[in-house]
Image (cartoon, rainbow, N blue to C red):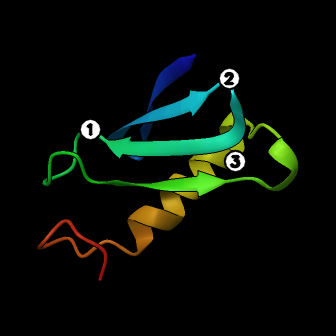
Amino acid sequence: METSTRVDVDGEVFEIVSWSDRPGHYNYNWISGKNPGYGFGGVRSGGVEATLDEHIINIREFLAGVDPETGFME
């Protein structure tokens, strides 16, 4: 089963998607970004679930690499 959670990180909105049959796998969909459908994915080793704080760290690291002009990774 797929579940999703919306979070606001530094003024940017992301939807974090996870699956009950794939613990530790995530898609981060950038809802407020310039490019519809853009975002990134992540996997934790050992199927360990990430905490909200860890998701926020992942999103901030992603945003740090985005070109503000294009809205894509530099």
Q: Disc 1 versus disc 3: distance between alpha carbons?
A: 19 Å
Mark nearer the viewer, 2 or 1: 2
Q: Which numbered dot is residue 70? A: none
Q: Which residue is mark 1?
A: 31
Q: Amino acid at mark 1?
A: Ile
Q: Nearer the viewer, residue 55 or 27?
A: 27
Q: Is residue 16 visible?
A: yes
Residue 23 figure quarter: top right
Secondary structure at badge 3 equals helix
62 relative to 11, above or below: below
Location of the C terminus (image quadrant): bottom left
55 relative to 39, above or below: above
Q: Amino acid at mark 2?
A: Ser
In contact (CB < 8 Å): disc 2 and disc 1: no
* Left or right: residue 8 compared with residue 24: left
Q: Which residue is mark 2?
A: 20
Q: Disc 3 versus disc 2: distance between alpha carbons?
A: 18 Å
Secondary structure at badge 1 equals loop
Q: Is residue 11 visible?
A: no
